[in-house]
Image: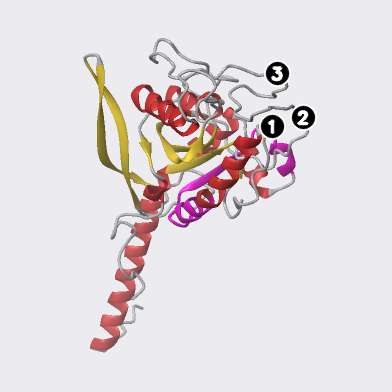
Amino acid sequence: MVQFIKLTRREALIAATQTLTAATLAGLTFAAEPQTGRTVPAVPGKLELRWRRRKKEGDTFRVIEETVHWEASETAIIICDMWADHPCKMAAVRVARIAPRMNEVVSLARDHGVAIIHAPSSGVKHYEDTPYRARMKEARPAEPPVPIKGWCYFNEEVEGPWPIVDDVKREGAKVSGCDDPVPRDYPDFDRHEHPAIQIIGYDGVSDQGQEIYNFLEQEGRKNVVLMGVHTNMCVLGRPFGIRQQKYLGKNVVLCRDLTDGLYDPRDPPHVSHARGVELIIEHIEKYWCPSILGESLTRVVPGSAGPENPLG
């Protein structure tokens, strides 16, 4: 026997509102978090990137500045080799200068739903017993469209002339391009990530190209931001760096105010260290990917993160 329950007008309105709210939330959840096996919550919100690239026109390059939108839930930041110390002490000082600002940018991006991957190469062993390391190792295996290389070297089929000399290793130096007045070898330097950069929440830790690719695919992250050091070496060449991400078909940008280079003004073209880094960034903008400023990662387009009050 079917029973009919008579509702007052007020009760009917409340019931209808609750049904509509539930449907709205269900729709938002479905739209923002498709069933892809993600482990990082996918939330609505569009990043507004103001990027800079360089387009070849005849014998010169024209600077092009554009505004593009990336879904935060489709974006990941990879922090490259921001070690607590470095065998080039001038480089270590610059990392210490960059790290607090990087942490601020990454923290705000994380709050908007951007995935964060910490990649302190050869320092990952320090994080083996953490959930951040486990998250990367346990990501679902994915088959890359091209081989993931141990290092992606200069590609003369893609790139024009390299703008600086950065392969000079002075006597006693551990690395080339070091601008210490008297370079020395520091074999036991600390490869933990710099302590000013926090690893927290759904972050991951890996320096393995395949692991990082697995994670990006599992989490639906087709957009990749590279930041860290050094732009002319590891940021470009690592198995998770700019060249490899481009080969894998990812949308890639360099965060140009949160990076540094290994360049010594004693070497050609004999410009300041700061100008040497700029020349590398310009090279990347010409041949590999646009660059952005960190502030583009700190906020989303107003209204893109969902309705004003879906529960009200």
Q: Is residue 128 left or right of residue 139?
A: right
Magenta stretch in the rendered image: 103-128
- Asked if one can make out residue 252 in the rendered structure from this viewpoint, the answer is yes
The quadrant of the rendering that contains the C terminus is bottom left
Q: By what rule are the colours in the image chosen?
A: secondary structure
Q: Residues within 10 Å of mark 1 (few under 14, many from 20)?
A: many
Mark toward the start of the polypeptide (1 vs 2): 1
Q: Amino acid at mark 2?
A: Pro
Q: Residues within 10 Å of mark 2 (few under 14, many from 20)?
A: few
Q: Which residue is mark 3?
A: 171
Q: Of 216 and 199, which appears nearest the observer?
A: 199
Dots 1, 2 in contact, CB < 8 A:
yes
Mark toward the start of the polypeptide (3 vs 1): 1
Residue at screen point 50% across, 51% down:
101
Residue 108 horizontal/vertical position (percent):
46, 56
Q: Amino acid at mark 3?
A: Glu
Mark toward the start of the polypeptide (2 vs 3): 3
Quadrant hosting residue 59: top left
Quadrant hosting residue 187: top right
Residue at screen point 28% across, 75% down:
16
